[in-house]
Amino acid sequence: MTDRSGLSRRGLLGAVAGVTAASALTAAPAWGADDLRPGAVNRPKLDRYDREIVSGLSSDRALQHLQVLSERIGPRIGGTASEKRAADYIASQLDKFGYRTRLEPFPVADKFLAQITDVRRMLPDDLCWQAGAAPGGKLDVTVEGPVRDVGPATAPVWPADVAGSIVIADDTAAARPALVAEAAAQGAVGVILLPADQAYPRRASAFSPSGLTDAPIPVIGVAQVQKRLIREALAVVTSLPLKISTAAHRGLISNNVIGERRGKGPIVMVSGHYDTVTGAPGANDDGSGTVLTMELARVFSRIPTDATLRFALWGSEEQGLIGSRYHVAQLAQDQRDRYRAVFQNDMVATSWDPAVTYWLLSFTGLANTATDAVREAGKRLGYDAQLVGPVQRGASDHQSFQEVGIDSANFSWRGELAPSFLEPPYHSPEDTIAKNVSLERLQVSMELIGCAAYAVAR
C-alpha cells in the first residue's frame, strides 16, 4: 500500500465514475490489430508480443484518468494542494493495478497564484482563469472592481474613474513599478498585466510578475488568450466587473509517484510528468503522457516480464525537471547500472493538425536502447515514415537520466519542421481535452511505447 495522505481511496475512485464525457472528442479509436493506423503509410506487421499489448490498450480508460486530472483537478502546480491531489489519485490507480507504489517527496520553491472570477459571466467559461500573482504585490486577498484599460504600461492613459477599478495594461518589466504605484495612488484595487503576443504558433503563458516590492494592491499576470478575451469583452460591454484573488503557497513539498513490479532482470521504466504550468489544465502537457503511463501500467500488470518494471510520474517538471533530477540523485550506482531504458512521454496526444511527426528526442542526440526500441516498434506498427530522430533535445525528464548515462529518450507528437514547433495551446489555458487532445494520437502513442517497452522488458 502507498504511504500518503489526501483524498480517500473511495473518493479517488469515485472521481473516475463521476466524470462525464462532456469533452468535445470523437469516439475512441476502434481499429483492429492488423488495420492501417491513422496517418500511417504501411499496414502493421505485428508479432505476437505486440498483439498482446495492442489488444489490451484502451484510450477510453486513459481518457477517464485524463478527465480527473485535467478537468476535476485542473492546473497542478508543483508543490501545491492540486498537485498533491493528482499524486494521490495516480498512486491509488497504481495500487489498484498491483504495483508497489510510493510517493517520493522533495521540497520546491514557493508559488504565487491568482484566480480571476467573471462577476457578470461575460467571459468564456471553457478555459482556465488561473493566473500568476506578483510575490511583491498584495497576497492572500480578494478584490473586485470594473476593468479599466490604460494601454501600454510605458505610456498609460489614465481615465477619470480609476478609483475602485482593476487596471489592465500591456506589460513591460521596466515599467511595472511605476505603473503599479500610480494605479494604487489613483485608487485602483488591483492590476492585471497583459503579456506581449508571441509569434504563431506560440502563445504567451500566465506569469507571476517580478520586480515589485511591497505593492499595496494585488498584481497578476495573465496568459495571451486571457488578455485577448478580456479586451474583446471590453469592446462590446459597458461594464466588465472582475474579482481577483491572490494566494501565496509556501513551504511546499512536491512528489514523484513510482509504481514497481520487481523482476530478475534489468529495470525498464515508462514515465511522464503530471504537473503543469500556472494557468494550464495540462491536458496534453503532460496529462497525456501521464495517462499513457497509467494505461500501460494497467496492461503490463497482467503480462509477465523478466525485467523489473517501473512506472513513474514526475512532479515539478515544469520548474526545471526537479522531480526526476531528485529521483536520479537518490539512485545508487548499482541501481543506475540496472537501467536498460527509460521511455519518457511528454505531450503525446495533441489534436493540432500540423503535429504529424512523432519525434524521438535524445538529450545527447544519439541513439540508445529507448530510441531503437521505439523505432523498431514504429516499423512494426506501420509508422516508420512518421518517426523522426533521434534528435538532440533536452527540456524533459529523459534529460535527468541521460545526464548520468542511463539510456532514455522523450517521445512526442510535434510539428514536422522541428521539435520546437509545439501546438498553440501549449502552456496555455486552452490546453484542455476539448481543445488539445486527440484520442487517435493518444492510442497510437500508447501502442508505440507499449510495444517498445515490452520488447526491451521481456
Image (spheres, helix red, strand yellow):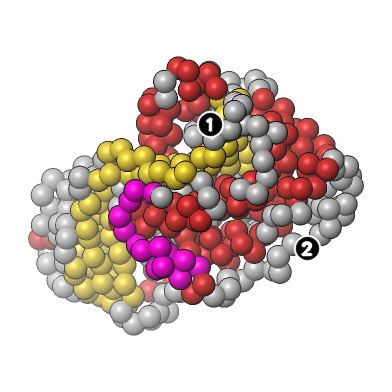
Where residue 93 appears, as percent x and y from the top left, is 49, 56
Q: Which residue is mark 1?
A: 398
Q: Residue at x 46, y 71 (%)?
A: 14
Proximity of marks 2 and 1: CB atoms separated by less than 8 Å: no
Examine the rendering and report whether any part of residue 435 can be seen. no
Closest to the observer: 197 or 420?
Answer: 420
Q: Residue at x 39, y 37 (%)?
A: 323
Where residue 31 appears, as percent x and y from the top left, is 81, 59
Q: For marks 2 and 1, give the CA distance.
A: 31 Å
Closest to the observer: 451 or 388?
Answer: 451
Q: Residue at x 36, y 40 (%)?
A: 104
Q: Is residue 134 a member of the stretch shown in magenta? A: no
Q: Is residue 6 a member of the stretch shown in magenta? A: yes
Secondary structure category for the residue under label 2: loop
Q: Label for residue 30?
A: 2
Would you call the spot at circle 1 few (<14 residues within 10 Å), some (14-19), or many (20 or more)?
Answer: many
Would you call the spot at circle 2 few (<14 residues within 10 Å), some (14-19), or many (20 or more)?
Answer: few
Q: Earlier in the sequence, mark 2 or mark 1?
A: 2
155 to the left or right of 285? left
Q: Label for residue 322?
A: none
Where residue 71 appears, as percent x and y from the top left, is 47, 66
Where residue 263 appears, as percent x and y from the top left, is 58, 33
Identify which amino acid the numbered label 2 is placed on. Answer: Ala
Query: What span is in magenta?
Result: 2-16
In what quadrant of the picture does the C terminus appear?
top right
Examine the rendering and report whether any part of residue 339 can be seen. yes
Identify which amino acid the numbered label 1 is placed on. Answer: His
220 to the left or right of 272? left
- Residue mark closest to the camera, 2 vs 1: 2
- Quarter occupied by residue 422: top right
Closest to the observer: 68 or 295?
Answer: 295
